[in-house]
Image: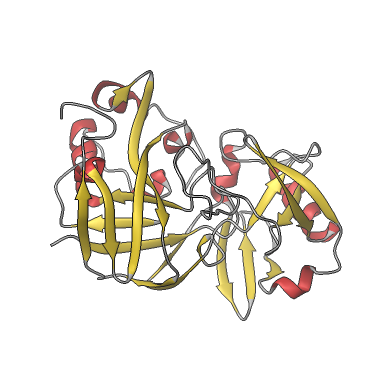
Amino acid sequence: MPYLSQIFIYPIKSVAGIPVQQWEVTKTGLKYDRQWMLVDEQHQFLSQRRLAKMALIKTQLKDEQIIVSAPGKSNISIPLHPTAYEENDSITVTVWHDQCVAKLISEKVDQWFSEFLEQPCHLVYQPSDSIRTVNQQYALGADQTSFSDGFPFLIASEASLALLNQQMGLTLGIQRFRPNLVIADCTSYAEDTWRTIQVGDIAFRLPKPCSRCPVPQIDPETATRGKEPLRTMARTRKWQNKVFFGQNALHDNAGTLQTGDTVIIQKIGPAQPPLNL
């Protein structure tokens, strides 16, 4: 029986994730997931696509704070509670094709990130009244997300990674693919056929496979770029000039997820992407 083996949250978009054993699910996804984001001077989002060095920034949650660390820098703390930002200035930020209102954090925080990344930037927070809906081609009207690339959840499986590693002759970690939920005890790429699943008490819809940008080529420990896994995926996971790994997902209810939760496959369909594996 498939089960939930790992949960990752990414409080700050495109920096290192945090593994957790149990976590709350809210209307926008996992609590705190990508509620903070770095933007440039034009208020466009920043990610490892532009700044691979972001991979070296790590976060942990402690005493109602996000503790942020990076090589050669003293740690800096950012308040978790939204009341800390209520009086802060608001700006309009851009995430791909979406624009939404965000709160600035502080000049001190901006300086910390700007110095490390050698790029002028601002850290921003998405307040609860800044609504970002999911693309209606794939979602229902009420579906929301935070500063994710487009969906509140990314689901991957251990078996798919194991097969990819075997094909590459390498051992890459699942963190390369930045999933929120990792499923164990299923066959490789079984998730390509899942349409609706139940994980613990949370119901999910899987409307679209995840096309992959170059970020998985970045070593999360060194921020250096290699050729894999995209080189192998171009041979094994390519469709319509894109390569795919994992499934974007939407959730129907709030609640709590815990590693070990049973995964019930409720509805399946043709493989997405339609590859003959």
**Label tally:** 0
Along the horizontal axis of the image, is 269 left or right of 36? left
Q: Residue at x 70, y 68 (%)?
A: 78
Q: Quadrant of the C terminus?
A: top left
Q: Quadrant of the N terminus?
A: bottom left
Rendering quarter of residue 266: bottom left
Q: Residue at x 56, y 49 (%)?
A: 56
Along the horizontal axis of the image, is 37 left or right of 104? left
* Residue 210 at x, y percent in the picture: 39, 38
* Residue 228 at x, y percent in the picture: 35, 30
* Residue 18 at x, y percent in the picture: 47, 62
* Residue 207 at x, y percent in the picture: 36, 43
Along the horizontal axis of the image, is 21 left or right of 31? left
Along the horizontal axis of the image, is 137 left or right of 110? left
Observer-nearest of 125 and 16: 125
Look at the picture and state if 55 lies above or below 253.
above
Observer-nearest of 146 and 16: 146
Rendering quarter of residue 97: top right
Q: Residue at x 62, y 37 (%)?
A: 51
